[in-house]
């Protein structure tokens, strides 16, 4: 994918003294008291900001946070907690600026955090007037927010249309490179893990991967639907009976290519969805009518781990069980540690996946950890993401 890269501008000495507007993805989870509970996205945004500051730019960084109502700012919508954490990581002040659309005072070598961009009227609908005002604030626009690349908003798309220079930050560029490496130029076998509660939310990605991968491991409610599609009992487990034909079609597509969707041979069940529920390992064919399947069983986990350790490339999206409950976390832990131990290039993405990676402490053993959720899935599907498309077009027009 041909886009102008911010690191190239820095290397060419084109950043010093320039006003640089960075659209980051600082949308981190917080507890009811407003404290950040997981800061991966903030830490991932630091290299771009540091590069701009070290190059002598006047730096503005903004992000969305939560789901504010446009034009109705509330204290809970504020990026202030994010700015405090950013200040700690950078070791320098990161003051928050409100009402910034019509002008920002910042000098070379300094950083300001522009308040939650989704509070601005017209942000989500990519209002041209708002986008032009944002573009007027800067000499260089840097999109480093892969997590929002699948949305055409004023701060991700419109500003890139009108800014004097529009480029990809290091995080965005790394996402492009990692997904390209995983899917366009994979080392085989290519194994994908797609887990989640519903087939319907992951159907397009399952279809897309069925044409590409050598093994398609399904987990969670998705696995239950696939089990049901192959005639196995699932008791009261979460599933989507209306999509059995779709599940069978994915299995058939894989089989026609000599590839496979491994179906669990054993599972961990409970009578209730609760952390203190009694866990029972059953053969997949022996699930009782009142059982809930909450994890894959040890035989299945061991077989999948062996496949992962032999893989050339691994794409991981989603835990394979209710890993938040200790009794039903074994499957996800085995999968996570197998990925960590594998010599394969691995790329992982999705909020629950990041939580599992953090829980098992394997961050340094995963080839690339994507900070995107929906954008990660859409790129895996082969879709053209709006924020990347505009950067490509700007790069082509600038040649």
Image (tube, rainbow, N blue to C red):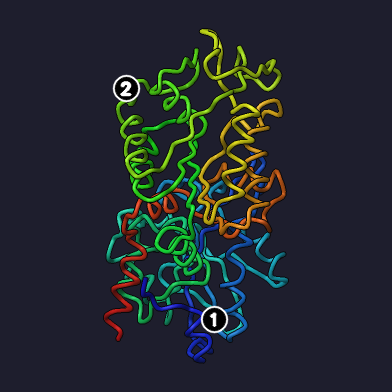
Q: How many marks?
A: 2
| Residue displayed at 48% across by 34% down | 262
Identify which residue, 131 or 239, lies in the foreground.
239
| Residue displayed at 48% across by 81% down | 19
* Residue topped by disc 1: 58
Kindly tell me whether residue 80 is visible in this rendering: no
Picture layout, residue 85 above or below residue 359? below
| Residue 8: x %, y % from top left | 48, 84
User: On the picture, is 330 further left or further right than 107?
Assistant: right
Kindly tell me whether residue 166 is visible in this rendering: yes
Q: Which image quadrant: the C terminus?
A: bottom left
* Residue topped by disc 2: 242
| Residue 58: x %, y % from top left | 54, 81
Give the mark nearer the N terminus: 2 vs 1.
1
Q: Callout 1: few (<14), some (14-19), or many (20+) C-alpha neighbours within 10 Å?
A: many
Picture layout, residue 394 above or below residue 380? below
The residue most toward the front is 258
Q: Which mark is on residue 278?
A: none
- Residue 163 position by quadrant: bottom left
């Amino acid at each position: 994918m041909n886009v102008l890269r911010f690191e190239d501008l820095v290397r060419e000495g084109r950043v010093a003294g320039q006003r640089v507007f960075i659209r980051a993805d600082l949308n981190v989870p917080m507890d009811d008291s407003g404290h950040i509970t997981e800061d991966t996205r903030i830490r991932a945004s630091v290299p771009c900001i540091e590069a701009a500051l070290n190059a002598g730019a006047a730096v503005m960084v903004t992000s969305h946070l939560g789901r504010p109502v446009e034009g109705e700012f509330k204290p809970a919508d504020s990026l202030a907690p994010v700015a405090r954490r950013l200040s700690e990581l950078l070791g320098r002040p990161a003051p928050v600026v409100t009402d910034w659309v019509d002008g920002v005072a910042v000098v070379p070598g300094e950083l300001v955090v522009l308040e939650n961009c989704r509070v601005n009227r017209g942000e989500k609908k990519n209002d041209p007037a708002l986008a032009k005002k944002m573009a007027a604030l800067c000499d260089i626009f840097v999109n480093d927010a892969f997590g929002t690349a699948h949305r055409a908003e004023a701060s991700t798309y419109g500003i890139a249309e009108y800014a004097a220079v529009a480029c990809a930050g290091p995080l965005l560029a790394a996402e492009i490179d990692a997904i390209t490496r995983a899917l366009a130029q994979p080392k085989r076998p290519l194994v994908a893990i797609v887990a989640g509660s519903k087939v319907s939310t992951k159907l397009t990605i399952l279809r897309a991967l069925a044409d590409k991968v050598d093994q398609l491991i399904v987990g969670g409610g998705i696995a239950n639907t696939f089990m049901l599609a192959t005639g196995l009992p699932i008791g009261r487990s979460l599933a989507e009976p209306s999509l059995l034909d779709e599940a069978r079609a994915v299995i058939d597509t894989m089989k026609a290519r000599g590839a496979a969707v491994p179906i669990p041979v054993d599972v961990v069940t409970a009578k209730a969805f609760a952390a203190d529920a009694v866990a029972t390992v059953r053969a997949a064919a022996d699930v009782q009518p009142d059982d809930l399947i909450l994890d894959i069983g040890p035989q299945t986990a061991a077989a999948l781990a062996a496949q992962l350790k032999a893989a050339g490339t691994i794409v991981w999206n989603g835990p394979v069980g209710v890993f938040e409950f200790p009794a039903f976390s074994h499957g996800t832990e085995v999968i996570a540690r197998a990925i960590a131990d594998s010599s394969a290039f691995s790329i992982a993405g999705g909020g629950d996946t990041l939580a599992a990676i953090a829980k098992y402490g394997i961050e340094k053993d995963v080839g690339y950890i994507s900070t995107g959720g929906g954008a990660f899935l859409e790129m895996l599907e082969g879709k053209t993401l709006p924020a990347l498309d505009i950067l490509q077009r700007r790069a082509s027009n600038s040649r």
